[in-house]
Amino acid sequence: MPTNDLPVLFVTHGTGPMMFLDSPAKLPVFGEVSRNCPLALWLRQLSKQLALPSVPKAILIITAHWETSNSVHISAKEKHTELFYDYGGFPKEAYEIQYKPPGDINLSKRVKTLLEQNGISAKLDDKRNFDHGVFVPLKLIYPDANIPVVALSILRSLSPDQHLAIGKALAPLRKEQILIIGSGSSVHGFDVTEQQSDAFMNELIKALTQYDEHEREKVLLNWDRVLPYARLNQPREDHFIPLHVIVGAAGSDRGQVLNPNVSVAQASFKFGV
C-alpha cells in the first residue's frame, strides 16, 4: 500500500488490569504480568516506536472482549466517561482505572457505511462502555486520552473468513489517517507449554512476516489445522480473531514483530510503514 497509509497493528493486551497493578501475576508461558513487566514497559513506549508522521485523526480498535451476534457493533458515543470493568477478583484499584477519550460519531458512521457497502451487517451502539480490551492497551500507549476512539466488536461466530472480510472493508480508513488496532493475544492458552507455544508462534510469525498476502490468508483461514498446537494456544479464538481483521486491513503489507524483546507468546505485530 502507499506509504501515506497508516500502518495497522495487532497488540497483545495482557491479562485483565494486571499492567496497572504492582502485585505481579506469574502466568505459564507469559511470565510476570504487572505494572513494570516487559509488556507494559513496551506498550508505554509504543507511540514513540511507531514514529507516525502525525497524530492519528482517530483510533479504531477491534476488541476481543466484545462479541455480538449477526451484526458488527460500533461504539457511537461523543464522550466516554465510564469504563466497563469486565473482570473480577482484583484489588479495588483495578476498578478505579480511568480512561476518557472522546468518541468520533462521524468515524462510527463511516465504519458502518464501509461495512454495509461490503455486505456486512453493522449497528451503531451508544450504550457500550469501553472494556479492558480497549482501555488497557490504549491507556498505556496513549495515556493522555486526547485521540478520539471508536471500538468495534467481533462476531460471535469467530469465523476467520468473516473477520478477514471485515478488515478488508475497513482498509480505506488507513488513507484517512485512522489508526486501526486489533486488541487480543497471540497466545491465550493457559495449559500450553513453552515448547508448544514457541512452535505455534514460530509458524505464525513466519506466515505474517514472510508470506505474501494470499499465502498468509490461507494460513489464517485454516489456522486451527495448519498451525502446530493451535487449540492449545487458542482454545477459543476470541483473542486471536482480531488479528484476522488486522490482516484483512493490511492488504499486501507484510508484518513485522513489534516487540521481540518480550515473551514470544505476547508478540504484537505491525503491517505497513
Image: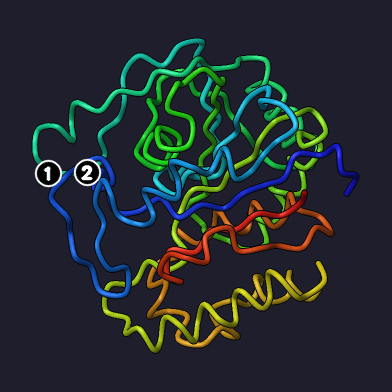
The crowding category of the residue bearing disc 1, from other C-alpha atoms within 10 Å (few below 14, some 14 to 19, many at least 20), is few
Closest to the observer, 266 or 127: 266
**In this image, 267 relative to 252: left or right?**
left
Distance between mark 1 and mark 2 Cα atoms: 8 Å
Closest to the observer, 119 or 210: 210
Dot 2 amino acid type: Tyr
Position of residue 232 relative to residue 17, above or below, is below
Q: Which mark is residue 157?
A: none
For the residue labelled by badge 1, is the local secondary structure a helix, a strand or a loop?
loop
For the residue labelled by badge 2, is the local secondary structure a helix, a strand or a loop?
loop
Count the marks: 2
Q: Which residue is disc 1 drawn over? A: 90
The crowding category of the residue bearing disc 2, from other C-alpha atoms within 10 Å (few below 14, some 14 to 19, many at least 20), is few
Q: Which mark is residue 87?
A: 2
Query: Do residues under tags 1 and 2 come within 8 Å of each other at their CB atoms?
Result: yes
Residue drawn at x 51%, y 17% as measured from the top left: 146
Position of residue 264 relative to residue 13, above or below, is below
Percent position (x, y) of residue 85? 25, 34
Residue furthest right in the image: 2
Closest to the observer, 85 or 137: 137
Question: Picture quarter containing residue 99?
Answer: top left
**In this image, 200 relative to 197: left or right?**
right
Percent position (x, y) of residue 124? 56, 24
Position of residue 185 relative to residue 70, above or below, is below
Residue drawn at x 74%, y 49% as measured from the top left: 249
Dot 1 amino acid type: Phe
Percent position (x, y) of residue 41? 38, 48
Percent position (x, y) of residue 89? 10, 46
Q: Nearer the viewer, mark 1 or mark 2?
A: 1
Residue drawn at x 67%, y 27% as measured from the top left: 56
